[in-house]
Amino acid sequence: MATNNIPNHKYVIETSDLEIFYGSFKAVTGVNMKIERNKITAIIGPSGCGKSTLLRAFNRMNELYAGTSIQGLVTFEGEDIYAPHVDPVEVRYRIGMVFQKPNPFPKSIYENIAWTARIHGYKGNMNELVESSLRQAALWEEVKDKLHQSGLSLSGGQQQRLCIARAISIKPEVILMDEPASALDPIATLRIEELMQELKKNYTIIIVTHNMQQAARASDYTAMMMLSGEGERSGTVIEFGETNRIFTNPKHKRTEDYVTGRFG
Amino acid sequence: MLRKTFENEIQQVKDDVLLLGSMVEQAILSSVEALKKRDVKASEIIFEKDKEINEKRFEIENKLMILIATQQPMAHDLRLLASCMEIISELERMGDYAKGIANINIRMGDAPLLKPLIDVPRMAQIGVDMLHQALTAFVNEDIETAKSIPVKDDEVDALYNQVYHELMMYVIQDPKTIERANWLLWVAHNLERVADRVTNICERTIFIATGKMEEIKSTDDEFWHNQPHQN
């Protein structure tokens, strides 16, 4: 995909009147967001309000589920990622994803990264790439002496960091994280959050989380999603702004109710 | 309603703040009453009872810390609990002013009052009324009242001004009265500070309700510019 790559452009991803459908069911409606470069944007909200659906629309991952479609616009570096000539696979190279459950390949730690890089056509020094990816994911020190052990032999938190190392080995610009720490214990969770602070120097991160404290601790911006209006079943972003403000002085009553735990 | 337990705990903290407030109101009024009657015994009791105010403040502070640590308050809850920290500290300092007035009465020994106390008890009453209204506005998150209370600070400042000039007249006429004048000036000064601190509580109430942190305009600065010993 040919993009107008202007690194100084403040916003990496922008949506305009975005609607997402599963068949005829409109799951997400009316989303207008600008995702700032080198920042962490958290998407919070109750279950079933479309957080993950919205996240997956940012790299066309929804298309892997049959019958999904969108209306409106999603741009990456100023270019419509849903335009007919755009290859969704390339979109997903540039906008990587880390999932809720760590999903390393049943291969060695080394191969989890090397294999990924090879199929993406990487021709450089593989040892260097493996080391730098693992270092960026804050995993190198823990695994450097057992690179040829299976990735599945690692703890849950280490596996998740391996998945992050794998995602960044192909040098994406944006990393989407869908509940990356919900299967981890509190220490492993904090390690992931610390890692996100390091990663945002080089990447833009969008994270879906059920854990409000995590959004408050780790993100720069927070998007509050809810089902829109009475009787409607579509999720939408009801408030989007600086995390510090959302958690101290939200504008919207429903945001206030959610962040103070009165929702439900 | 979710978080019923937390709501109850917040209500308890508010009740505790009101209780601390009434202890302070009582201390201020009785410290001036004891001075007016030159009742040293009563002042000694007030001086000792300040410890109870301090203990109550620490007790509330501890409850607030536990709530913040265990309940992770956000938004309005967070503003409320953080502001309570500030308000109890203001109240504790007001208690210190009452203790200071009690201390002056104790230190005056047998010396008679330089003049009968008229304006000083009036200052105390206005200050305590302001405090009472400010705490009611805090509990009800009544922004309009919170904004209107600091205006009454002008009355306290005017009375202080009056007391100051009166006492200076005594000193000019008879320099030997300087120490007794100074005692009363300190008492009036403490009461003037009480009213100022009420303004801080009103500012917190507005912050809790709106999230806006702003200073309510006080005429305090103008007061100092009007002092004869200032430029």
Image: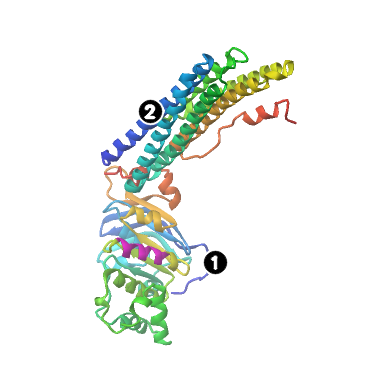
Residue picked out by circle 2: B19
Residue A57 appears in the picture as rendered: no
Q: Is residue A46 magenta?
A: no
Query: Residue at the spot x=36%, y=45% of the render?
Result: B68
Residue A12 position, x and y percent, is 47, 64
Residue picked out by circle 1: A8
Name the chief secondary structure element in magenta: helix
Nearer to us in this view, A91 or B31: B31
* Residue under disc 1 on the same chain as residue under disc 2: no
Query: Where B198 falls versus A30 (above or below)?
Result: above
Query: Residue at the spot x=33%, y=74% of the render?
Result: A162
Nearer to us in this view, B112 or B218: B112
Query: Residue at the spot x=48%, y=22% of the render?
Result: B43
Query: Where A137 falls versus A149 (above or below)?
Result: above
Nearer to us in this view, B48 or A131: B48
The chain carrying label 1 is A
Residue farthest to the front?
Answer: B110
